[in-house]
Amino acid sequence: MQDLLSLNERTEVIDYCSKRYGLAATHWEKYELRKSSDAIWAMPVELRLFVEGHSSGAWETAGMRIFSGRKFPYKITSSFSSLFGHFLTKGLLIVSGDQAKQLIFEKQIEIQDEGEIEDGYLVLRYGALFLGVGLKRGFKIESQIPKKLVNQLSSKLELSD
């Protein structure tokens, strides 16, 4: 079952994304946000008419799972990076081809960081391609790229292990 986020919950999510990722509040205006037991889903408001009166599964089909987790702050998903990645001004790590390959096949890279990147979940990008999400801890980035995307990404990047 999914419930519409309350105004306070929605504000909390938008404020968090503004502070952590530099995502302007205006990017959320066209999305309705719903919460399931372990995720937050976004769906364009104009699709509401198509899913009203249907099961909660219809909402999940029309929407995108943009956060995972049961409590705030939630973990961003690869769908979040696809939907909002082009608008981020923070929390974004641009990687080289070699780093992209390491993230996809070895699941981890080390970076040189002089404190400008906060620990936590980051959106990973190689060129114009959003790879997904990574978890930064100190000087290490751990890939959170779903297994189902690894084959797609490796073919797009023409990488092989």
Image (cartoon, grey):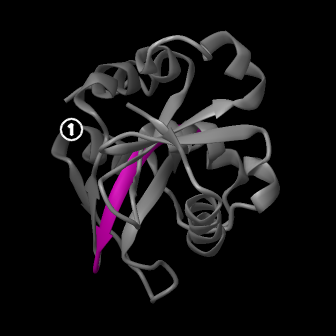
Q: Quadrant of the C terminus?
A: top left
Residue 95 showing in the rendered view = no
Q: Relative to 84, is 109 on the left or the right?
A: left
Query: Looking at the picture, how far across and down is residue 10, in whole percent?
Result: 61, 58
Q: Which residue is mark 1?
A: 105
Q: Residue at x 46, y 23 (%)?
A: 60
Q: What type is the residue that disc 1 sits on?
A: Phe
Residue 98 showing in the rendered view = yes
Q: Is residue 151 above or below residue 41?
A: above
Query: Count of labels shown?
Result: 1
As drawn, which residue projects farthest toward the bottom?
A: 115
Q: Quadrant of residue 47?
A: top right
Q: Is residue 49 above or below residue 93?
A: above
Query: Looking at the picture, how far across and down is residue 25, in whole percent?
Result: 76, 60
Q: Relative to 21, is 112 on the left or the right?
A: left
Disc 1 element:
helix
Dominant secondary structure of the magenta stretch? Answer: strand
- Depth check, front residue: 62 or 86: 62
The residues colored magenta run 128-138
- Depth check, front residue: 12 or 113: 12
Q: Is residue 50 above or below residue 44?
A: above
Query: Looking at the picture, how far across and down is residue 39, in whole percent?
Result: 38, 43
Q: Residue at x 52, y 40 (%)?
A: 34
Magenta-drawn stretch contains 37: no
Q: Residue at x 44, y 34 (%)?
A: 2
Q: Quadrant of residue 78?
A: top left
Q: Is residue 24 above or below residue 48?
A: below
- Specify few, some or many for label 1: CA neighbours under 10 Å numbering under 14, 14-19, or 20 or more: some
Q: Residue at x 35, y 71 (%)?
A: 111
- Depth check, front residue: 97 or 40: 40
Query: Looking at the picture, how far across and down is residue 62, in whole percent?
Result: 56, 18
